[in-house]
Image: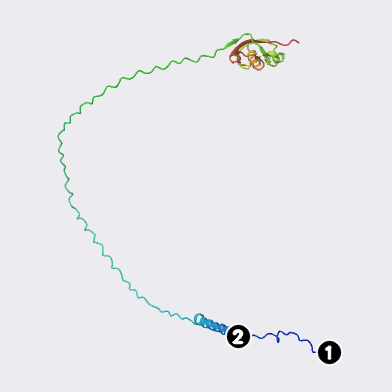
Amino acid sequence: MSDDSQAPAHRYDPLWDAPRRAKGSTTRNIIAGGIIIGLHVALIVYLYYTKIAPHYVTYEDTAVKVELRKNAPPPPPPPPPPPPPKNLPPPPPVQVHETPLPPVNIPAPPPIPIAPSPPQPPAPTPPVVAPPQPPVQHTVTNPEFLRRPNEDDLNRYYPDRAQRLEKTGSATIRCTVSSRGTLSNCSVLSEDPAGYEFGSQAVKMAMATFQLKPKTQDGTPVDGGVWTTKISFRLAAD
């Protein structure tokens, strides 16, 4: 036989070739379906009686009777007193009789004895304080100069008026020597001639230019030395 006479091969069809279920499974499906239908019916009945059924509320109007009572009126005020009669004589004046009291002699109290005051101690004698001694000043007689004015210093401090009038002069001054050798507290003792500012210019030049070797005590420079000097102003020769 040829191949064309053979029957075609069978193909699987899920609709017709599905396996058949057993009888027990069908019974279980029917029971489950009945249970589901019963639950739905019970749910519908519950919703009907709880949600859909109308509830009516009855209201009654109750009237309250109130009786109002009026308060009793207040009693009328008492009548005013009758006015006093007119043209009555004034009452007689009241006379007061004062009886003087007998004098009472009160004895004077005895004098209170005064205790004598205790003797006062003598006032303490204030201690005698000696006045402070002025600082001992020593006179510098032969100073050792560290710096002294030169010719330019003399020309710079020469009094202007004396220089214009070509006047020469001098001044004697006294100064205090410090521990650094500088001069301070300078004063004019005399000037010649007077009235040309030789003294004031000599003081300015001394404090600005002079420097002495100070006095030492136990090797330490000390203040208080007094130095007296005479400064002469002379015109430079042409």
Tell me, yes or no, if residue 193 can be seen here.
no
Is 57 left or right of 33, judged from the image as shown? left
Residue behind mark 2: 24
Mark 1 vs mark 2, CA separation in Å: 46 Å
Where residue 149 sits, quadrant-wise, is: top right
Residue 143: mark = none
- Foreground residue, 70 or 219? 219
Outermost residue toward the front in this view: 1
The disc, 1 or 2, on the residue closer to the chain's N-terminal end is: 1
Give the quarter of the image for residue 117.
top left
- Placement of 87 over or under 23, stated as above or below: above
The residue singled out by tag 1 in the image is 4
Q: Secondary structure at mark 2?
A: helix
Q: Is residue 27 visible?
A: yes
**What x and y, as percent, mark residue 138?**
58, 11
Residue type, numbered disc 1: Asp
Direction from residue 6 to residue 206 in the image, left or right: left
Residue most toward the right?
A: 2
Rendered location of residue 160, percent (x, y)? 68, 16
Element type where label 1 sits in the image? helix
Q: What is the quadrant of the N terminus in the image?
A: bottom right
Q: What amino acid is at disc 2?
A: Gly
Of the 4 image quadrants, the one containing the C terminus is top right
Crowding near the residue tagged with mark 2, few <14, some 14–19, many ≥20 C-alpha atoms within 10 Å: few
